[in-house]
Image (spheres, helix red, strand yellow):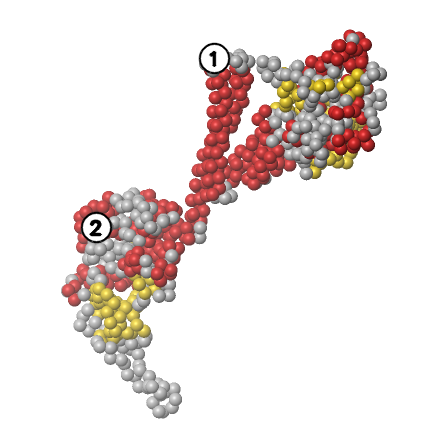
């Protein structure tokens, strides 16, 4: 202790042995220490004083002593300011403000006060080390730790404000970070005491000092080195309030975020920059140090030129920092971002819906234009048609782009806020539309994907929609038919009939039913049972009216197909078609049936006429021959090898009669129907392609008569047997029987229909696939084409009649 000074000590020294020999524990004579304080070393220099480390001999602790500098010893105003600093600081009893312990004069008349020693580093020094990349500092002081420091600083400043004190010199140099996590706001030397709080004079607990506030220009040390942290109004010498300190807190935040002060330079130029609030954007000040947007926003608000745009109090700013620290600020920012993207997504969805409607109009325009042109016309002549087709392409592209834009915006909203209710609801509704479209087209894969997406985004409002329950209303003509119902269960794409239950008598309903495919059977005495398939689409009511027909009306060898809607086509060509009642032959026309036709023709028109109708092709020759007994028979080479051996075992030696007739032209098929009509007195005709498709697939849009699974063992095609493909008797594959009871609904032979394939009416449509085709041609919606006069080894016929 090289120098002793300060007032006299008042604490008696105790003997080393705790007594004087008169007995243990007896206090020694009172011997005061020479001085209360003893100097240990220097801490630093300030504007008005020197700060030293001294030992308090009374309390046996080290404290910081700030002593007025000698040059101000005779300056009364400075002395008052110095004492006022001590008084103000002593009354700011806050953990973030070092406490003042004592104030007095040294024996030589120097004014001093003592305060807590804060051991550690200044925030300014710490930020410089971070800028230099000091590893230990970077590891200890993350951005989160720095913001915690600033939040504590802001709370201490708010406490001072509530006591009527403005600091006016907040800067990193005046923030001390203790070795044990302490954060102290230092140097209240130019603080303004007695400031108004929200326009009101401070109350009884306000800080009181011996000095009154002096104009800024008379304050020592308030410009040099602190200009970059002043508020614009302070730099302009205007009246200040607590929002000036809030601005300074903003500059400290700016420096924490960027490791650079907001303002740099010297002299008048620097003051002008500060007064004008011109500083680099916090986001781009240090490209190597990314700045969280929510913190950048807090910094911008705190450093707003207009004090009214800043946080109203230091506590309000501390709250914003605290929100960021515990995630609320970032959550709120993400919520705002998500809400904005969600709003844009809703607008984009409206454009998407409008675009989808434009496709329908564009496609109708193409259909209208196609009727005005012929295929052989030149491109210039077809300009309107080409333009219409281009409009469809453009419309579809616009839909795709609108959908992409909508999903991008809404999924962006969910990236910002995964549980944003608005974005999730719009996405659920968007995919609901896609699901409706896919189901209307019978596109099972697209529907499954869309349903998955609806379930992903729906938070409950679409629960009933996703369940898909609908209902059935069924009327009978005449009424009173008993109705039973089975539900088809999808087992790996193969539809299996579930348990049958009685529903009562017609009329019935509305009967709640889950979404799916059903078969209702109507039974009434005097009438054959009616097989009536029902398709309950998502949240839809199936309304049907079934007229019961007598066996005579339907005809022997025919099945009844009740009228009503069914899903026709596939993919973009899918549509709902409504047909009236009709009947269709249970089986294709066989060689045995054709033999009767040839024999009748021979009797009526002669052998040459019959020979002209003999099935066959130019390459294979005839498929039938007239025996010596005058009987027309199928040739044995129509079915050979292992297939023939199997058929002989299963059907006997006359099985050739059961093979589907082939090698007949469309004209031959029409001639057969006309003969049957004359012979029976009832209409026999070729079905339209719509009738042939409905009879094969029912009403639910299944791809094959048995369901959606593609399996060659279920219908007669080229891969159905191990040996080379050969035709087989009708009905050999019962799984290819339709819901109405029509056998060989897929495979065996192509059926001629009465429908034209092209607008020039050069070819007719064939349906059903054949024994030599790949499985894909057995799909109920698959179409083939043939010139009416052409005879193919794969083409036969099946008859129908109107009811």
Between the residue at mark 1 and the residue at mark 2, the CA separation in whole angstroms equals 76 Å
In the image, is residue 235 above or below residue 119?
A: above
Quadrant containing the C terminus in the rendered view: top right
Quadrant containing the N terminus in the rendered view: bottom left
> Along the line of sight, which residue is nearer the eye, 232 or 262?
262
Quarter of the image where one finds residue 494: top right
- Where residue 9 appears, x then y in whole percent? 27, 77
| Extreme residue in the front direction | 628
> Along the line of sight, which residue is nearer the eye, 206 or 296?
296
**Could you tell me which residue is drawn at 45 percent across and 37 percent down?**
341
Q: Name the residue under label 2.
A: 265
> Along the line of sight, which residue is nearer the eye, 764 or 185?
764
Quarter of the image where one finds residue 592: top right
| Extreme residue in the bottom direction | 22
**Could you tell me which residue is drawn at 78 percent across and 8 percent down?**
606
Left or right: 60 in relation to 796: left
Whichever of callouts 1 and 2 sits on the residue coming sooner in the sequence is 2
Q: Is residue 442 visible?
A: yes
* SS category of the residue bearing label 2: loop
The label on residue 381 is 1
| Extreme residue in the top direction | 605
In the image, is residue 364 above or below residue 38?
A: above
> Along the line of sight, which residue is nearer the eye, 602 or 417?
602
Left or right: 767 in relation to 116: right
* SS category of the residue bearing label 1: loop
- Where residue 709 appears, x then y in whole percent? 67, 35
């Amino acid at each position: 202790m090289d120098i002793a000074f300060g007032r006299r000590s008042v604490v008696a020294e105790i003997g080393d042995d705790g007594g004087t020999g008169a007995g243990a524990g007896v206090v020694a004579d009172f011997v005061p220490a020479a001085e209360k304080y003893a100097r240990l070393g220097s801490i630093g220099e300030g504007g008005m004083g020197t700060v030293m480390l001294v030992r308090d001999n009374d309390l046996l602790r080290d404290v910081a002593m700030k002593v007025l500098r000698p040059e101000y010893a005779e300056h009364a105003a400075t002395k008052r300011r110095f004492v006022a600093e001590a008084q103000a600081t002593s009354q700011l009893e806050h953990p973030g403000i070092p406490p003042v312990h004592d104030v007095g004069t040294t024996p030589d008349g120097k004014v001093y006060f003592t305060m807590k020693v804060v051991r550690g580093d200044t925030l300014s020094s710490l930020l410089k080390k971070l800028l230099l990349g000091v590893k230990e500092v970077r590891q200890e002081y993350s951005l989160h730790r720095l913001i915690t420091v600033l939040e504590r600083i802001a709370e201490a400043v708010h406490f001072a404000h509530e006591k009527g004190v403005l600091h006016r010199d907040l800067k990193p140099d005046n923030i001390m970070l203790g070795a044990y996590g302490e954060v102290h706001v230092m140097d209240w030397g130019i603080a303004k005491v007695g400031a108004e709080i929200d326009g009101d004079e401070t109350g009884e607990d306000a800080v009181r000092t011996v000095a009154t506030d002096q104009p800024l220009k008379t304050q020592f040390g308030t410009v040099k080195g602190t200009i970059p942290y002043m508020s614009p109004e302070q730099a302009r010498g205007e009246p200040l309030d607590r929002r000036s300190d809030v601005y300074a807190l903003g500059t400290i935040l700016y420096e924490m975020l960027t490791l650079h002060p907001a303002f740099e330079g010297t002299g008048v130029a620097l003051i002008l920059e500060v007064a004008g609030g011109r500083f680099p954007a916090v986001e781009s000040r240090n490209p190597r140090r990314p700045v969280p947007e929510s913190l950048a926003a807090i910094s911008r608000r705190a450093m707003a030129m207009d004090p009214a745009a800043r946080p109203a109090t230091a506590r309000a700013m501390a709250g914003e920092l605290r929100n960021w620290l515990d995630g609320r600020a970032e959550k709120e920012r993400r919520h705002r971002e998500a809400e904005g993207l969600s709003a844009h997504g809703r607008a984009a969805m409206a454009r998407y819906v409008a675009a989808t409607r434009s496709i329908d109009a564009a496609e109708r325009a193409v259909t209208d234009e196609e009727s005005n042109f012929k295929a052989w016309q030149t491109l210039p002549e077809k300009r309107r048609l080409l333009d219409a087709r281009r409009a469809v392409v453009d419309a579809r592209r616009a839909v795709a782009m609108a959908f992409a834009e909508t999903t991008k915006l809404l999924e962006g909203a969910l990236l910002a806020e995964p549980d944003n209710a608005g974005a999730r609801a719009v996405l659920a509704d968007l995919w609901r539309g896609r699901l409706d479209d896919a189901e209307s087209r019978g596109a099972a894969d697209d529907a499954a994907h869309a349903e998955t997406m609806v379930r992903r985004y729906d938070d409950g409002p679409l629960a009933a929609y996703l369940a898909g329950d609908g209902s059935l209303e069924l009327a009978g003509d005449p009424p009173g038919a008993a109705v039973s119902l089975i539900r088809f269960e999808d087992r790996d794409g193969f539809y299996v009939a579930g348990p049958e239950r009685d529903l009562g008598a017609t009329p019935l309903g509305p009967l709640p039913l889950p979404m799916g495919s059903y078969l209702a059977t109507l039974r009434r005495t005097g009438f054959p049972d009616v097989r009536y398939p029902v398709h309950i689409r998502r949240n839809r009511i199936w309304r049907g009216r079934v007229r019961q027909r007598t066996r005579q009306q339907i005809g022997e060898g025919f099945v009844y197909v009740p009228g009503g809607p069914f899903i026709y086509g596939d993919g973009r060509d899918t549509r709902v078609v409504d047909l009236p009642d009709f009947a269709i032959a249970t089986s294709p026309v066989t060689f045995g049936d054709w033999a009767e036709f040839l024999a009748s023709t021979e009797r009526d028109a002669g052998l040459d006429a019959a020979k002209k109708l003999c099935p066959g092709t130019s390459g294979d020759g005839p498929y039938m021959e007239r025996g010596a007994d005058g009987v027309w028979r199928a040739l044995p080479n129509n079915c050979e090898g292992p297939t023939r051996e199997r058929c002989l075992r299963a059907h006997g030696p006359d099985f050739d009669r059961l093979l589907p007739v082939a090698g007949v032209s469309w004209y031959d098929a029409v001639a057969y129907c006309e003969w049957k009509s004359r012979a029976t007195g009832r209409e026999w005709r070729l079905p339209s392609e719509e009738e042939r498709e409905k009879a094969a697939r029912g009403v639910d849009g299944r791809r094959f008569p048995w369901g959606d699974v593609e399996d060659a063992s279920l219908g007669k095609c080229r891969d159905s047997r191990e040996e080379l493909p050969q035709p087989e008797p009708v009905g050999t594959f019962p799984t290819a029987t339709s819901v109405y009871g029509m056998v060989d609904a897929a495979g065996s032979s192509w059926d001629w229909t009465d429908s034209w394939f092209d607008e020039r009416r050069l070819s007719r449509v064939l349906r059903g696939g054949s024994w030599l085709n790949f499985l894909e041609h057995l799909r109920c919606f698959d179409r083939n084409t043939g010139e009416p006069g052409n005879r193919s080894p794969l083409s036969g016929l099946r008859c129908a009649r109107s009811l």
